[in-house]
Amino acid sequence: MLPGVGPRSAQRMAYHLLQRDPAGADRLAAAIGHARNTIGHCRLCNTFTEHELCSLCAGPQRDRSLLAVVETPADLLRIEQTHTYRGLYFVLLGKLSPLDGVGPRQLGLEPLAQRVAGGEVREVVLATGFSVEGEATAQYLAAWLTGRDIRVTRIARGLPVGGELEFVDSGTLAQALLDRRELGP
């Protein structure tokens, strides 16, 4: 049931807990039950939290004019780990995927529309993944935000830090060339 855990790994984990650590199995079950009963969604950004507002939305030090739109709470956490972004977030909890039955209605964009219409947000940073679905989601949101008095930007993509050109795939290298920026005055 968990991503990245196949049937054999799951079986080994279950056997370990049942045979060698029954108290650990009980703690795991209790922790999952507690999380399921106490964790909900932040009223503003839609990430997981135990309170009405998550700590980021409640924090006064964040730049409220900057709003990053991400696919998942894990994406939010990953951006936070860079210590470079000081704005707020909106978590879609998915991405457009017609084959999976996920369209704009399933993404629940009404809270995002309310935040953008509130007048405090000046820039929306589209920080969805670079998969086909992530790109489609970013393109849809960019078009959806057109006509509002808001700057819409997209996170950059390209070569990894420390990467060697000879080992980079041609698609990534082509995009890095297309997304190049000017240096110096």
Image (cartoon, helix red, strand yellow):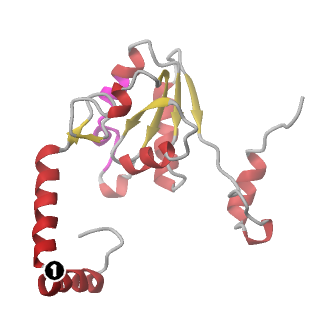
Near-viewer residue (80 or 71): 80
Q: How many marks?
A: 1
**173 horizontally vs 14: left or right:** right
Q: Is 167 left or right of 156, judged from the image as shown? A: right
Q: Which image quadrant: the C terminus?
A: top right
Q: Which residues are magenta?
A: 102-113
Q: Amino acid at mark 1?
A: Asp
Say above or below: 156 vs 45: below
Q: Is residue 70 left or right of residue 111?
A: right
Residue 17 or residue 76, whichever sits in front: 17
- The N terminus is located in which quarter? bottom left
Q: Quadrant of residue 165?
A: bottom right
Q: Residue furthest top?
A: 119
Q: Is residue 164 magenta?
A: no
Residue at (72% x, 67% y) in the render: 168
Q: Position of residue 51 (x, y in %)?
A: 21, 34
- Disc 1 secondary structure class: loop
Q: What residue did someone put label 1 on? A: 21
Task: Please provide percent x and percent y for residue 130.
Answer: 55, 53
Farthest residue to the right: give it: 185
Q: Main secondary structure of the magenta part?
A: helix
Camera-side residue of 172 and 162: 162
| In the depicted structure, whether residue 174 falls above or below residue 114 | below
Q: Classify 24 as above or below 177.
A: below
Task: Tell me what residue is drawn at x 68 percent, y 59 percent.
Answer: 172
Residue at 78% x, 44% y is 180
> What crowding class fits label 1: few (fewer than 14 Cα within 10 Å), some (14-19), or many (20 or more)?
few
